[in-house]
Image: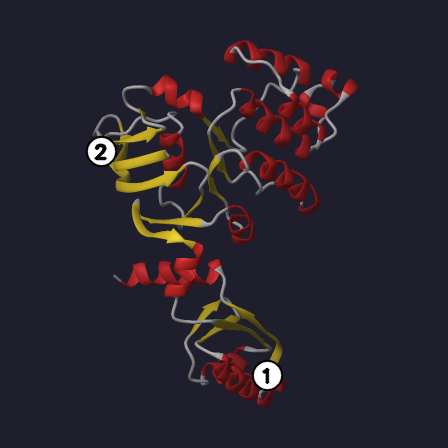
Amino acid sequence: MEAVKVVNLTKRFTLNPLTKKQITVLEKVNFTLSEGEHLAVMGPSPSGKTTLLKLISGIYLPDEGDVYVYGFSCRKKNEAVRGLTCYLSPQIQFNKKLTVREILRYFTRVTGKKIDEDVEELLETADIVDDVYDKRIEVLSDVQVAVLKLSIGLIKKPKVLLLDEVFGALEPKIKEVFAKAVEKVAEESTLIMVDKEMETLERFCKKVLLLTKGKVAALGSVKELLSNYPYKFDVEVMPKTSKSIKKILELEYPYQRFGSLIRFYLRNENEVLELTSELLKLKDEIITFQISSIDLEDVYYWLIAKMRKT
C-alpha cells in the first residue's frame, strides 16, 4: 500500500511582499513510499528538506503538484492528511509553565483521543511517571521534553512520522534513550526523517532521498547507493604540518580535503595495502591514519561533489 506519494511537488516563498520576488525551494519533486518504509532526506543547507517534511504533513500547501498520504490529497483533504501525519521538530515549543498533565489533557481534547498504553509506555522510557505528571515543563530534562513531544504526536496515532533533526540537541546518553523510543514507534509507522548525523539516518532508514537546490539528486535504497559508488574503502590521514600535507597529496589516489584532514578513496584491498605501505614510509609526517569501509556519509559527499560539477 502507498503511504506517501509526491507528484511534481513545487514550493515557492515570497522574499519581498512589495516586489513579489519569490524563491523556489522545491521544484518538481517526485517519489513514492510504501507503508512501513523509512526514508532519510539528505542534502546541503538549504536544499528544501524541512519544507518537504512540512508539505507532507500538511503544514504547508504546494504551489504546484501535490502530496498524497494514504490517497488523501494535501490540497483537497488537508485535514485528513494532518490527522494521518505527525511532524516533530526542536522548533516546536510548549508553554513551559504548564504541567505535563495539563499539556496532555489539552492535546487529548484537541484530537478527541485518549492516552493509551503505548503512549504511557513511551512516557515511562523517560521516567515520566506518577508525580512527574504534575511537574512543569520547565523542570523536565531534555530527553523528557523530547519524549513528551513524541508522545503527544502519537496520541492521534499517526501513520506517517516526520522527524526534523530531533536528535541534534540531545547529549549522547540522552540520545540513545530517545532513539530507542523512536525505534519502538517506527516499527508501526512510515518514517521520514532529516538529521545531520549519518549514523542516526543509517540506524533508522533503508532508503535515501538526496536533495540539492530543491531538486531530487538521488533516490534509492542505501544498498543501491553503496553498490553504485565507485570506491569500497576510505583512509583518513591527519598530517602534522602544512608541509606534510603537500607530501601526502603527492600520493596518486583520489582524495578530498576537510580542513587539514585528508580522506583517500580506494577501490579494492590491494589499493589499501599499497597506500598503507606508502603512508608508513611517511610516518614522521603523519599524526594518525585510519582505514574504514565506505558508508552512507562517503556516498553523500561524493554525490554532492558530483552535483556541484554539473
In the displayed orientation, state which residue is furthest to the front.
1
Quadrant for residue 150, please give it: top right
What secondary structure is found at the residue carrying circle 1? helix
Label 1 sits on residue: 285
Residue count near mark 1 (Cα–Cα under 10 Å), binned few <14, some 14–19, many ≥20: some
Q: Amino acid at mark 2?
A: Lys
Q: Position of residue 179 (x, y in %)?
A: 62, 41
Q: How many marks?
A: 2
Q: Is residue 140 left or right of residue 223?
A: right
Q: Nearer the viewer, residue 119 or 238?
A: 119
Residue reaching furthest to the bottom? 281
Quick check: 147 left or right of 306? right
Residue 246 vs 310, above or below: the answer is below
User: Residue sitting at 38 percent across and 45 percent down?
Assistant: 46
Residue 4 lies, in percent from the top left, at 36, 34
Q: Is residue 57 left or right of residue 9?
A: right
Q: Which mark is residue 21?
A: 2
Relative to 216, does residue 272 appear above or below in the rendering? Answer: below
Residue 186 appearing in the image? yes
Q: Amino acid at mark 1?
A: Glu
What's the CA distance linking mark 2 and mark 1?
53 Å
Mark 2, residues whose alpha carbon is within 10 Å: few (<14), some, or many (≥20)?
few
Location of residue 178 in the rendering, given as x and y in whole percent from the top left corner: 64, 38
With 224 as the anchor, is 153 left or right in this view?
Answer: right
Quadrant where the image shows the C terminus: bottom left
Q: Secondary structure at mark 2?
A: strand
Where is residue 200? Give x, y as percent.
55, 48
Residue at the extreme right: 131
Query: Residue visible at 55% across and 13% down?
Result: 113
State which tag comes first along the sequence, 2 or 1. 2
